[in-house]
Amino acid sequence: QFCAIRSYLSTAAKHGHHFFDTLVTLAEGNPWLPAIP
């Protein structure tokens, strides 16, 4: 589980999202998802 969360946060960071904001939106039930090209 740790690795899955860490990977999710790393991907979000690569797309310019701050880790705390990403976790907050995830906890609110509105997870960030990368855009599909």
Image (cartoon, rainbow, N blue to C red):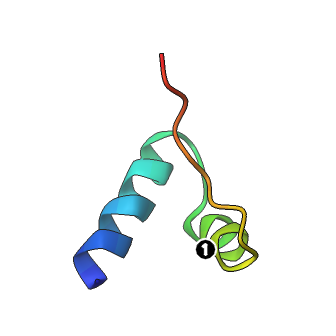
Query: Which quarter shows the N terminus?
Result: bottom left
Q: Secondary structure at mark 1?
A: helix
- Can you name the residue that lies furthest to the front here? 29
Q: Residue at x 63, y 70 (%)?
A: 26
Q: Crowdedness of circle 1 by 10 Å Cα count: few (<14), some, many (20+)? A: some
Residue 30 position, x and y percent, is 72, 62
Relative to 25, say whether 10 is above or below.
Answer: above
Label count reads 1
Amino acid on which the number 1 mark rests in the picture: Leu
19 left or right, relative to 26: left
Q: Residue at x 44, y 63 (%)?
A: 9
Residue 7 position, x and y percent, is 31, 62
Residue 21 position, x and y percent, is 69, 67
- Can you name the residue that lies furthest to the top here? 37
Q: Nearer the viewer, residue 28 or 19?
A: 28
Q: Residue at x 37, y 57 (%)?
A: 10
Residue 8 position, x and y percent, is 40, 61
Q: Nearer the viewer, residue 17 or 5?
A: 5
Q: Residue at x 61, y 53 (%)?
A: 32
Q: Nearer the viewer, residue 14 or 2?
A: 2
24 left or right, relative to 18: right
- Can you name the residue that lies furthest to the bottom here? 2
**Residue that label 1 marks:** 23
